[in-house]
């Protein structure tokens, strides 16, 4: 939500649906980025610009409050209480920079917006209860949160608060053994599915400003269309491989419990959007997405590849440096694999040296083609016609039935996406 208008819009969407619901809000558009910038200025000791930035953040919220609360009494009360919340943010910058404070600071956007939104709903006569996510979002393992703990804490809180049908909570923030933390950028989607799993919700709706998942990246390819249904696996592959619309981990908490996710557009609330569930409604090719910033590493060894235990040793190097591998291909004398986190690349490279000759290629993109049972699709082979036109560094086929991935130089990504779009969605498909 970026404006008073969109906040009103969200209020209408919520009040048009009956039943008990938990509303998870992210920060106002741009505010988390502003907070990240203010931390940078704080680190640099640039007090003057930091003061300016904080003023800007404050003003953004005040402007929205002024538009949302025409009634003077409500407006003044909200502005005053917002003022005290804002002082809490300012106080975070008082001492020296610390990592702990950083996490706390970036979560303020959610604190502010949920406070304003809850007050606005109240002023519009819609009863609601504002919760503090820090009281229950205990997440020690980011990849695999223990929703049982959250369930227990939430149950206790809701038992005390049981007067309204609408609960409002902050996305993005969590607490772990070290205190306040975050679920990483874009994490509010993930907050929603974690809570949904904890309370065993009937469904999750994720409202953004796009019409759900598209069959190709609308930033680079013309004439893409929204996909009305995806399985959890398809959505996970697409989210992980670049489609910016969902936080990559979003589907995992609800997948086990079979709770469907609906991706909806706040500007076209009646459009169907994308449903993500365990049902397989159609098989075959469904979508294409790309993930940038991929580094390929080749280990070439005449002696060792065929020896048993070789791959284990290679993987142990990556494991030791906590670096996840995305794609793998092997040949008789070499193995190629890709990573996206290069923070430990130098250490990894040094250790791999003992196993063979190492080549590192940066600036690559994984192009991921997704669909249940894709590799049995009669048209899937057309993906390989691309090899005529584009130099492909790696291909992964058969790892699962639902995915074919290609690694290309990022400079050819857009061309690859367009070519695939023409081959797979535009040209006459083979039906017999
Ligand atoms: N406000 C956070 C961010 O900008 C979380 C989210 O938007 O989902 O990353
Ligand atoms: Mg988001």
Image (cartoon, helix red, strand yellow):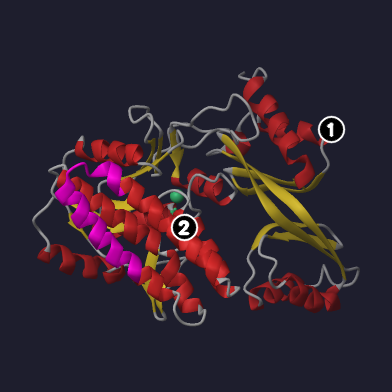
Label the magenta part by its dominant secondary structure: helix
Boundaries of the magenta span:
65-87
Residue 366 visible to the viewer: yes
Q: Residue 392 occupies which quadrant of the picture?
A: top right
Left or right: 387, with 403 as reference point: right
Q: For disc 2, does the CB lie below 8 Å from ligand 1?
A: yes
Number of marks present in the image shown: 2
Q: Viewer-proximal residue, 119 or 236?
A: 119
Which of 357/81 is in front? 81
Dot 1, crowdedness within 10 Å: few (<14), some or many (≥20)?
A: few
Quadrant that contains the N terminus: top left
> Whole-Å distance between the Cαs marked 2 and 1?
44 Å
Callout 1 secondary element: helix
How many residues crowd around disc 2 within 10 Å: few (fewer than 14), some, or many (20 or more)? many
Q: Is residue 192 above or below residue 207?
A: below
Residue 179 location, x and y as percent?
A: 39, 78
In this view, which residue lies farthest toward the left? Answer: 163
Work out which residue is located at the far front of the displayed protein and give it.
48
Q: Is residue 144 above or below residue 9?
A: below
Is 383 or 62 nearer to us in this picture? 62
Q: Position of residue 376 (x, y in %)?
A: 61, 35
- As for residue 213 lying within the magenta part, the answer is no
**Residue for point 22% across, 44% down:** 69
Q: Mark 1 highlights which residue?
A: 388
Q: Residue at x 87, y 72 (%)?
A: 356
**In terms of secondary structure, where does tag 2 sit?**
helix
Residue 290 horizontal/vertical position (percent) = 64, 44
Determine which quarter of the picture holds residue 104: bottom left
Quadrant containing the C terminus in the rendered view: top right
Task: Look at mark 2 in the image and give the residue it sits on.
Answer: 32
Earlier sequence position, callout 2 versus callout 1: 2
């Amino acid at each position: 939500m970026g404006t008073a208008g969109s906040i009103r819009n969200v209020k209408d969407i919520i009040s048009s649906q009956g039943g008990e619901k938990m509303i998870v809000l992210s920060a106002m558009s741009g505010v988390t980025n502003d907070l990240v910038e203010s931390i940078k200025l704080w680190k640099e000791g640039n007090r003057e610009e930091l003061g300016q930035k904080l003023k800007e953040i404050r003003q953004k919220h005040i402007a929205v409050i002024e538009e949302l609360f025409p009634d003077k009494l409500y407006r003044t009360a909200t502005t005053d209480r917002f003022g005290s919340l804002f002082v809490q943010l300012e106080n975070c910058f008082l001492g020296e920079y610390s990592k702990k404070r950083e996490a706390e600071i970036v979560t303020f956007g959610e604190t502010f917006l949920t406070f304003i939104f809850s007050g606005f709903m109240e002023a519009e006569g819609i009863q609601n209860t504002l919760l503090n996510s820090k009281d229950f979002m205990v997440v020690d393992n980011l990849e695999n949160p223990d929703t049982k703990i959250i369930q227990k804490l939430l149950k206790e809180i809701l038992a005390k608060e049981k007067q309204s049908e609408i609960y409002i909570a902050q996305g993005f923030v969590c607490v772990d053994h070290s205190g306040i933390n975050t679920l990483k950028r874009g994490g509010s989607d993930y907050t929603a599915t974690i809570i949904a799993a904890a309370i065993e919700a009937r469904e999750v709706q994720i409202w953004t400003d796009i019409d759900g998942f598209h069959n190709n990246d609308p930033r680079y390819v013309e004439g893409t269309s929204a996909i009305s249904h995806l399985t959890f696996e398809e959505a996970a592959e697409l989210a992980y491989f670049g489609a910016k619309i969902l936080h990559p981990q979003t589907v995992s908490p609800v997948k086990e419990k079979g709770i469907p996710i609906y991706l909806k557009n706040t500007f076209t609330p009646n459009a169907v959007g994308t449903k993500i569930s365990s049902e397989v409604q159609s098989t075959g090719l469904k979508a294409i997405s790309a993930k940038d910033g991929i580094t390929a590493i080749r280990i070439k060894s005449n002696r060792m590849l065929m020896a048993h235990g070789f791959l284990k040793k290679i993987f142990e190097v990556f494991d030791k440096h906590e670096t996840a591998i995305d794609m793998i291909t092997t040949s008789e004398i070499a193995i190629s694999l890709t990573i996206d986190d290069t923070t430990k690349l130098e250490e990894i490279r040094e250790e791999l040296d003992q196993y063979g000759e190492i080549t590192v290629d940066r600036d690559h993109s994984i192009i991921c083609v997704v669909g249940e049972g894709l590799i049995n699709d009669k048209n899937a082979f057309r993906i390989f016609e691309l090899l005529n036109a584009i130099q492909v560094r790696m291909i992964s086929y058969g790892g699962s039935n639902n995915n074919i991935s290609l690694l290309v130089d990022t400079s050819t990504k857009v061309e690859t996406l367009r070519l695939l779009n023409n081959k797979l969605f535009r040209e006459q498909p083979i039906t017999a």
